[in-house]
Image: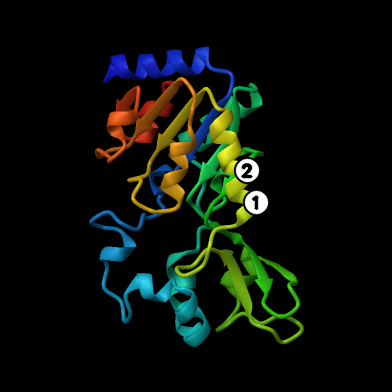
C-alpha cells in the first residue's frame, strides 16, 4: 500500500491539470453517513423506502413526510471538512487541481476552501421557493417547523436533485469540460454505480486515472492506479 501511495504522490507532482471526482466516501470520514453501504440510509428501515421519499413525486404528494425525513437525515450543517477536503483545497491553491466534481450535497468542499466545485446533485445549503424563486439558506430550512414556506406563501424546495429529476445541464457541461482537459483524474469514495454521474468518467482522455475506494469498482480495470483504502489514510500522505 505504501508503494501505491508513493506512486499517487508522484502522479500529483507530475500533473498540472488535476480533476477530482468524489462520492459519499469523501464525507463519511466527517461523520456523514452514506447511502448504499450496509449501514447506509438505504439499508435502514423507515415508514417509506428512502429512495421513494427522495423522489420528486413523493416531494410533491407527501411534502410534510418528505421534510420529516429530510430534516432528520440530510442535515449536514454541523459537520466539518476532513483531511481529504482540506488537501484538495490546498492542491487548488497550488494551481494543480482545476475542479472538484462531487456527488455530495453537504457543501464541505467549499467549507474547506475549494472554489471550483461542480455539485452534480445540488446542495442542502441552497433552497428556493417554487413560486417566486426566492433563496433560503440551509439554516432556515433545518430550523423551521413543518414544511418550509416562503414569505410569498410558496413551498420551499431544497436545491438537491431528487429521483425522477435531471441533472443541471450547465454543471454537466462544466464537469465534462474539466474531465476532458485533465491530465490526472482522481476518482474517490464512490462505487460508480449511479448514472448518469458515473458515466462522466468515459470523457477522460488524459494520461492517468486513479481510483481510490475501500471496495473494488467496475472501473478498476481502466485505471492506472487503484488504491483500496480509506481516503483519510491516502490524503494525509499528500
Please give the name of the residue rendered at 40% of the width and 37% of the height, measured from the top-left corner: 188
- Residue 139, percent from left and from top: 63, 66
Q: Is residue 73 left or right of residue 134?
A: left
- Residue 35 in percent (x, y) is at 35, 58
Q: Is residue 134 left or right of residue 96?
A: right
Residue 216 versus residue 4: which sits nearer the camera? 216
- Image location (x, y in percent) of residue 159: 60, 64
Residue 99 drawn above or below residue 80: above
Alpha-carbon distance for marks 1 and 2? 6 Å
SS of the residue under disc 1? helix
Dot 1: within a 10 Å radius of its alpha carbon, few (fewer than 14), some, or many (20 or more) residues? few
Q: Residues within 10 Å of mark 2 (few under 14, many from 20)?
A: some
| Residue drawn at (37%, 55%) of the image | 33
Which residue has dot 1 on it?
170
Residue 16, placed above or below residue 59 = above
Q: Which residue is mark 2?
A: 174
Q: Secondary structure at mark 2?
A: helix
Point out residue 179 in the picture as x, y percentages from the top left corner. Answer: 54, 34
Amino acid at each position: 500500500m505504501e508503494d501505491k501511495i508513493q506512486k499517487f504522490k508522484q502522479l500529483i507532482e507530475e500533473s498540472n491539470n488535476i480533476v477530482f471526482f468524489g462520492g459519499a466516501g469523501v464525507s463519511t470520514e466527517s461523520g456523514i453517513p452514506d447511502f448504499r453501504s450496509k449501514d447506509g440510509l438505504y439499508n435502514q428501515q423507515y415508514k417509506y423506502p428512502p429512495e421513494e421519499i427522495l423522489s420528486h413525486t413523493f416531494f410533491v404528494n407527501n411534502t410534510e413526510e418528505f421534510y420529516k425525513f429530510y430534516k432528520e437525515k440530510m442535515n449536514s450543517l454541523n459537520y466539518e471538512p476532513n483531511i481529504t477536503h482540506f488537501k484538495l483545497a490546498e492542491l487548488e491553491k497550488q494551481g494543480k487541481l482545476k475542479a472538484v466534481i462531487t456527488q455530495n450535497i453537504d457543501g464541505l468542499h467549499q467549507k474547506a476552501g475549494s472554489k471550483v466545485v461542480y455539485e452534480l446533485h445540488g446542495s442542502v445549503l441552497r433552497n428556493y421557493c417554487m413560486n417566486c424563486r426566492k433563496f433560503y439558506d440551509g439554516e432556515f430550512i433545518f430550523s423551521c417547523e413543518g414544511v418550509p414556506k416562503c414569505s410569498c406563501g410558496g413551498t420551499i424546495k431544497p436545491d438537491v436533485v431528487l429521483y425522477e429529476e435531471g441533472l443541471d445541464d450547465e454543471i454537466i457541461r462544466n464537469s465534462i469540460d474539466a474531465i476532458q482537459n485533465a491530465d490526472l483524474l482522481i476518482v474517490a469514495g464512490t462505487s460508480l454505480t449511479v448514472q448518469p454521474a458515473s458515466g462522466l468518467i468515459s470523457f477522460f482522455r488524459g494520461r492517468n486515472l486513479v481510483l481510490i475506494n475501500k471496495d473494488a469498482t467496475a472501473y478498476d480495470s481502466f485505471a492506472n492506479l487503484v488504491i483500496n483504502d480509506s481516503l483519510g489514510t491516502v490524503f494525509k500522505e499528500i
